[in-house]
Image: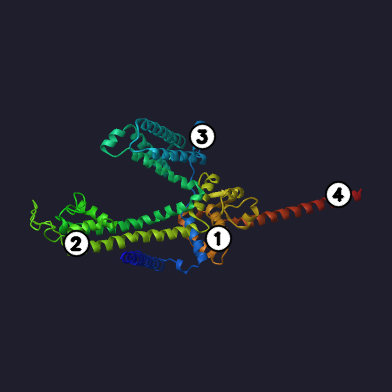
């Protein structure tokens, strides 16, 4: 007999149910592709006619076109502020703060429910030390960065966390009595550990997962609204039909259909596919002795505490199919789709991190954010980049061969340099130049300073001009030397 249940679980649950989920995910992806195809065909898109090589280049162009140089935070003129500025802007300082956050996390793991008074005092003073250290970090950054401190999102988050930590330390009893446990403030502090993902090169996989989650949030919000709408309708329906069902099995003071809030709690439980049968059992009671059909309810004309089996079965089966098998699995479909996109983008030769690194290095060579760099600094700049965009020294011959456009004053625009370096990484193609011109027109609005400067020469032409000038100068010197030599010989012969 047990083989019957094993076979049903394998074929009915594992196989058939996953086929059901697979069909939902497949149809979701098809509908999404249709929408994308419509947008590409009727809203001026040309991606569908591109080769894989062109798509790779096009994706890189979209990433670099969404960014532009930013003006770095200026170093303070005051010597003390400048010293602190140099300390807090070093990567080693950020790493040390991350280590302190990890240690703080370890101390929170040590805390138990029933610990003695000495342990509580030790953990209290350790937590106080961490609050002082994090407050000191905040004060140092405020002192050195001035009002620029609040232009960085992470700094604002750190500032709020520090304020909450201080409030949680000194008003712990009042907060715990009237609001929430102060431990929650210490838990929020641990969210700062997410900053370490930018510092660790090996955390690329974790960053891909977080990127997929961030991409999924808008779609997940829409699906959440759809789920709420379904729950709202079924909650009203449940209140109309099962409000006075006898309290037994899974129906009690908390889980019932008497109020809208309790109905929503019941439906949320059913959405997780956990314990729904205990809620259905009292509804299947249709008469004595399981329930009392004549029981009076004060304040209501409804009599009896019996359920309605046919309506109850339809209610539960339809809700489980709609909520759990369809809507909840749409969450999975969205996350899988965006994870695939994130994985595909992370596998490309150039990622968002590479372009961010480019502009971070650019800030050091263009502190005023003019979007131009002197030709004389180009070699040092190319050598300062990280792979794959870097061009280690000696690199002058390679930079000249890139034939970069130059404006008056021997300056080169950042977008031209980034185009050339991107092309070097992705490789040559017959149609990439035409695609670049098309993309550059689109990005011109994001780089208005570039439109007001017309190139007067290129690095290759400048080198050719220099070589030509050198040849002409050498020829003139030779001519002048020969002429002088003939004059001396003539004067010697005359004597």
Q: Is residue 180 above or below residue 14?
A: above
For disc 2, the neighbor class at 10 Å (few under 14, some 14 to 19, many from 20) is many
Looking at marks 1 and 4 on the same chain, the residue that comes earlier in the sequence is marked by 1
On screen, residue 47 versus residue 481, left or right, reads: left
Q: CA distance from mark 2 to mark 4?
A: 121 Å
Q: Earlier in the sequence, mark 2 or mark 4?
A: 2
Residue 340: percent from the left, percent from the top? 44, 60
Of the numbered discs 4 and 3, the one sitting upstream in the chain is 3
Q: Residue at x 20, y 54 (%)?
A: 249
Among the 4 quarters of the image, the one containing residue 29: bottom left
Q: Secondary structure at mark 3?
A: helix
Q: Can you give x and y, in whole percent of width and height, for residue 296 in the image?
A: 8, 54
Residue under circle 1?
426
Write the residue at 7% across / 57% down.
Answer: 294
Quick one: 251 or 53, which is closer to the camera? 251
Q: Look at discs 1 and 2 and give the one toward the viewer.
A: 2
Give whichever of discs 3 and 1 has the lower sequence position: 3
Residue position for label 2: 312
Is 396 situated left or right of 232 in this image? right
Q: Which mark is residue 82?
A: 3
Precedes in sequence: disc 3 or disc 2: 3
Q: At x 29% / y 33%, what residue is drawn? A: 173
**Mark-to-mark CA distance, 4 and 3:** 65 Å
Residues under numbered marks 1 and 2 in contact, where contact means CB atoms less than 8 Å apart: no
C-alpha gap between disc 3 and disc 2 = 72 Å
Number of other residues with Cα within 10 Å of mark 4, as a class: few under 14, some 14 to 19, many 20 or more: few
Of circles 2 and 4, the one toward us is 2
Does any portion of residue 90 appear in the rendered image?
no
Residue wearing tag 4: 488
């Amino acid at each position: 007999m047990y083989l019957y249940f094993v076979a049903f679980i394998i074929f009915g649950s594992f196989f058939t149910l996953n086929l059901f989920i697979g069909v939902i995910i497949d149809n979701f992806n098809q509908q999404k592709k249709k929408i994308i195809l419509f947008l590409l065909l009727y809203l001026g898109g040309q991606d569908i006619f591109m080769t894989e090589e062109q798509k790779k280049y096009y994706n890189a162009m979209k990433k670099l076109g969404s960014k532009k140089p930013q003006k770095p935070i200026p170093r303070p003129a005051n010597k003390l502020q400048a010293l602190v500025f140099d300390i807090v802007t070093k990567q080693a300082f950020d790493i040390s703060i991350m280590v302190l956050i990890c240690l703080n996390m370890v101390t929170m793991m040590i805390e138990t429910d029933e610990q003695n008074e000495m342990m509580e005092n030790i953990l209290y003073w350790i937590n106080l030390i961490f609050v002082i250290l994090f407050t000191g970090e905040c004060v140092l950054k405020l002192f050195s960065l001035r009002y620029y401190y609040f232009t960085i999102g992470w700094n604002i988050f750190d500032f709020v966390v520090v304020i909450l930590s201080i409030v949680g330390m000194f008003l712990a009893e009042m907060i715990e009595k009237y609001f929430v446990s102060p431990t929650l403030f210490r838990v929020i502090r641990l969210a700062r550990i997410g900053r370490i993902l930018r510092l660790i090169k090996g955390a690329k996989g974790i960053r891909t997962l977080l990127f997929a989650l961030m991409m999924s949030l808008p779609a997940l919000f829409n699906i959440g609204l759809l789920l709420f709408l379904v729950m709202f309708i079924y909650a009203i329906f449940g209140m109309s039909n099962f409000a006075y069902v006898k309290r037994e099995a899974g129906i009690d003071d908390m889980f019932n259909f008497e109020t809208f809030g309790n109905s929503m709690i019941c439906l949320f439980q059913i959405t997780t596919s956990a314990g729904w049968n205990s809620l259905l059992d009292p509804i299947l009671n249709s008469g004595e002795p399981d329930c009392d059909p004549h029981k009076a309810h004060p304040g209501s004309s409804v009599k009896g505490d019996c359920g309605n089996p046919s309506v109850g079965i339809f209610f539960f089966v339809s809700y489980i199919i709609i909520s759990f098998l369809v809507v909840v699995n749409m969450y999975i479909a969205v996350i899988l789709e965006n994870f695939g996109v994130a994985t595909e983008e992370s596998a490309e030769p150039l990622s968002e991190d590479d372009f961010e690194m480019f502009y971070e290095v650019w800030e050091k060579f263009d502190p005023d954010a003019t979007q131009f760099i002197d030709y004389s600094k180009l070699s040092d700049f190319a050598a300062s980049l990280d792979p794959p965009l870097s061009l280690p020294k000696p690199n002058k011959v390679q930079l000249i061969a890139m034939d970069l456009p130059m404006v008056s004053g021997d300056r080169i625009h950042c977008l031209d340099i980034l185009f050339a370096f991107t092309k070097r990484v992705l490789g040559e193609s017959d149609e990439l130049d035409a695609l670049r011109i098309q993309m550059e027109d689109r990005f011109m609005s994001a780089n208005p300073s570039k439109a007001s400067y017309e190139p007067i020469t290129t690095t290759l032409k400048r080198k050719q001009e220099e070589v030509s000038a050198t040849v002409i100068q050498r020829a003139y010197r030779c001519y002048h030397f020969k002429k002088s030599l003939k004059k001396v010989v003539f004067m010697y012969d005359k004597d």
